[in-house]
Image (cartoon, grey):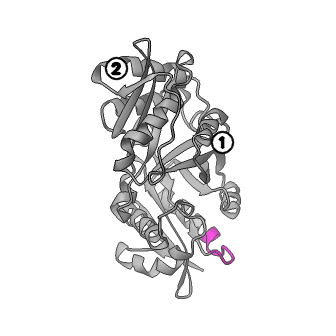
Amino acid sequence: MLVRPLDRDRLSALDSLLARYPYHDFRHYPRFPPEARTRALIHELEAATAHGTLLAAWAGDDPVGVGFVEPLAWDTSFFGLPMGRIGPLVVDAQGQQGLDPLLDALLKAAGDLGLRHLAVKVDCGHLEAVQALEARGFRLMDCLVTYLYDTQDPPPGTKQLVLVRDYRTGDRETVLAIAKRMYGNYAGRFARDPWLPPEATRRFYVEWVRNACAGEMADRFLVGERGGRVVSFLAYRRIPSVFEATGIRIAGQGISAVLPEGIGSYPALLATAMATDQPNYDFAEFDTPIENTLPQRVFQKLGLPLVRSKYTLHWGTG
């Protein structure tokens, strides 16, 4: 088994391997053809060559695995240590023989890049990859489940228990106060990470919302009002890499919060987003950690199917 760097002009050699990949993120999406799934993977791998390291495992002339490691500039600046991520671990479904040498090579490449912390997301069905990562010191941080709205379906209706409107600049301080209150002790994957500074993990989601208020992390920002007071919000954006690779428009990467006095806001925010943005997207993704049962009950009540579940694992030094 040989693992070596792969230039972007040789990505076409991976077409057969990528087409056979059984854990593609979009495999349960309607109207997302197999060739588009392959293009999405190629685009992600190609982008990683700009400032990361792309590696492929070969058995003779046949590629049996591919993955990349890349630095994460924003995370590095925010948390104060060199951070990166390992991209999709695409290995041959027959035997997984490229997985171990590929992972070893990726960890060496991470060391050469000076990275001291890594994150990787793995489909919950790919348990061989989870076990291989754990054997190398990675620790499980969360399980993220994804529900899907297909915009060809009628938007779901729900009781409008709050007034939903677009975010305005004057809402900023109120929205940030909601984020600080609701995310101050949030037990997400960063809070579970023993390698990250606790003070920074408590600020992470508030900073995400701050960037969304500035228009940097959101294309659409909705707030819920009750009695003239903002009690909830929902921000999301179009996932650019998928659109660039396939032309398929997916809304996602959202963040939301609801004050206790804003109970009933979340279904109204979702239903409004789906109804008013329906012409602008092909799909809308809704992610949440698996232990968050309340939003999942909302997704299910709105008739949204579960289409994906992924583990997040972290690795660190010290």
Is residue 57 in the magenta section?
no
Callout 2, which amino acid? Answer: Asp
**Eyeballing the image, is 179 above or below 45?**
above
The reply to whether the C-beta atoms of the residues labelled 2 and 1 are less than 8 Å apart is no
Report which residue position mark 2 lands on: 171
Residue at the spot x=41%, y=79% of the render? Answer: 12
Q: Position of residue 160 (x, y in %)?
A: 49, 26
Residue at the spot x=49%, y=72% of the render? Answer: 34
Most foreground residue, 39 or 115: 39
- Type of secondary structure dominating the magenta stretch: loop
**Eyeballing the image, is 55 above or below 88?**
below
Q: Residues within 10 Å of mark 2 (few under 14, many from 20)?
A: some
Report if residue 200 is visible in the image: no
Residue at mark 2 to residue at mark 1: CA–CA distance: 30 Å
User: Of helix, strand and loop, which one carries label 2?
Assistant: helix
Single out the residue that lies furthest toward the bottom. 61
Single out the residue that lies furthest toward the top. 227
Q: Position of residue 281 (x, y in %)?
A: 38, 51
Magenta segment range? 93-101
**Eyeballing the image, is 267 above or below 289?**
above
**Eyeballing the image, is 99 above or below 136?**
below
Is residue 95 in the magenta section?
yes
Earlier-in-chain disc, 2 versus 1? 2
Q: Position of residue 115 (x, y in %)?
A: 48, 50
Residue at the spot x=39%, y=42% of the render? Answer: 74
Callout 1, which amino acid? Answer: Ile
User: Of helix, strand and loop, which one carries label 1?
Assistant: loop
Q: Position of residue 169 (x, y in %)?
A: 28, 23
Q: Quadrant of the N terminus?
A: bottom right
Report which residue position mark 1 lands on: 290
Most foreground residue, 110 or 225: 225
Report if residue 122 is visible in the image: yes
